[in-house]
Amino acid sequence: MTDSHELSTAEYTRYSRHIILPEVGLEGQQRLKRSSALVVGAGGLGSPVILYLAAAGVGRIGIVDFDAVDVSNLQRQIVHSEASVGTSKLRSAEHRVHELNPFIQLDLYEEKLVADNARRIFEPYEVIIDGTDNFTTRYLVNDACVLMSKPNVYGSIYRFEGQASVFSAADGPCYRCLFPEPPPPEAVPNCAEGGVLGVLAGVIGTIQATEALKLLLGIGSSLAGRLLLYDALEMRFDTLIVRRSDDCPVCGKNAVIKTLQESAVSCASLFPQEASGAAREITPEDLHHRLMGEEPLLLLDVRNPEEYELCHLNGSTLIPLRELADRLGELDPARETVVYCKSGRRSKKAAELLSAHGFTNVRNLTGGILAWAARIDSSMPAY
């Protein structure tokens, strides 16, 4: 990228379809080259945002992420490739962006976004695009944008449904106007285990990229004051009006949040590691040894039927966690029971539920079926 904000001959050709749009034109394309945007997260939502902002010629793009590419990401995180598995998501995105458009500046922040670094990271950018997948970071992004007067282009996805909006723009509402406080832990679906239709990330992420470009160009009407809802199964878009709340804790008349903090729930808090009445654990190796001895253990799988169909331990009984409380009568409280799920989180919760209802000999499989696949049976598919 050159120091000048004038377009080179190569850039005239590259952006010609933009330049011939009256709403963009040469001045608008030069404005994009002078502009800057920060993408928080290089995952499902961040992938299309990063690619389309780069393709559009946004002159400076920052990306925040500290994760590595996993093969399970490739179903939706299209900025990455098979060759990137195991490497930094930032380096993977950097490689793809430079292949796509060498005329932009890319800033990489390979660190977790927290209250202590959010202001420093956000400061150079005009627009912040939230591609996060957890409430802790989502509330942090919102609060930082409000306190720093930066528009927050929001998106979220789960299973077959997505949302998008623009928060903290001018006198518009912020995310806390809609959701003042994080939801209770029991209401938060588990990020890794809930599932998501891969293409949904593309739909919502592309909407976010569109909103960001409109903000940078100063054209059209943004989603500020509106929450766009998308149902992929029904192929339906709905829009809700969202108004700024006088009682909002961060942007209201009597705001109480004056500094950045991290007080929201995350997926991990659904399954606290230290809890009263915590279930005993059993390692994959110990379970394998006992099963080889043909001990009469009950293997209780508390995943969803779709997961069970993908892979399960031989001889196991399936009762999804959401049904367990209503089906306790199907189980013998005196029988030694080993509960398992994908990673050990849902099964930990299930084991505690069983223990609380008089089951005296319950164990939780440490690490779940993923640990079993990694350490005992490599032929079992990991997902």
Image (spheres, rainbow, N blue to C red):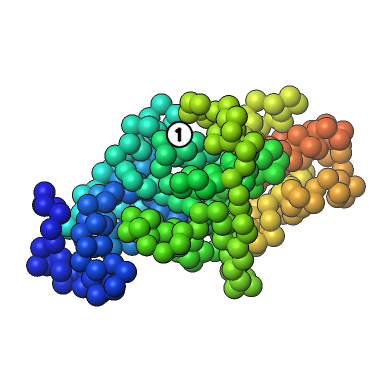
The residue at the point 87 percent across, 39 percent down is 333
| Amino acid tagged 1 | Leu
Residue occupied by mark 1: 147
Q: Is residue 255 above or below residue 135?
A: above
As rendered, which of 12 and 243 lies closer to the eye?
243
Say how many tags the image has. Answer: 1
Q: Residue furthest right?
A: 329
Does residue 336 appear left or right of residue 211 in this picture? Answer: right
Residue 125 sits in quarter: top left
Residue 184 sits in quarter: top right
In percent of width and height, residue 225 lies at 55, 54
In percent of width and height, residue 231 lies at 61, 66
As rendered, which of 32 and 199 lies closer to the eye?
32
In percent of width and height, residue 365 lies at 64, 39
Disc 1, SS: helix
The residue at the point 24 percent across, 68 percent down is 25
Q: Is residue 20 above or below residue 123?
A: below
In percent of width and height, residue 148 lies at 41, 35
The residue at the point 40 percent across, 53 percent down is 46
Does residue 93 appear left or right of residue 224 in this picture? Answer: left
Note whether residue 62 is visible: yes
Q: Is residue 4 above or below residue 356?
A: below
Note whether residue 70 is visible: no
The residue at the point 17 percent across, 58 percent down is 102
Q: Is residue 207 above or below residue 88?
A: below
Answer few, some or many: residues within 10 Å of disc 1's Cα (few below 14, many 20 plus, some between 14 and 19). Answer: some
As rendered, which of 232 and 284 lies closer to the eye?
232
As rendered, which of 310 and 64 lies closer to the eye?
64
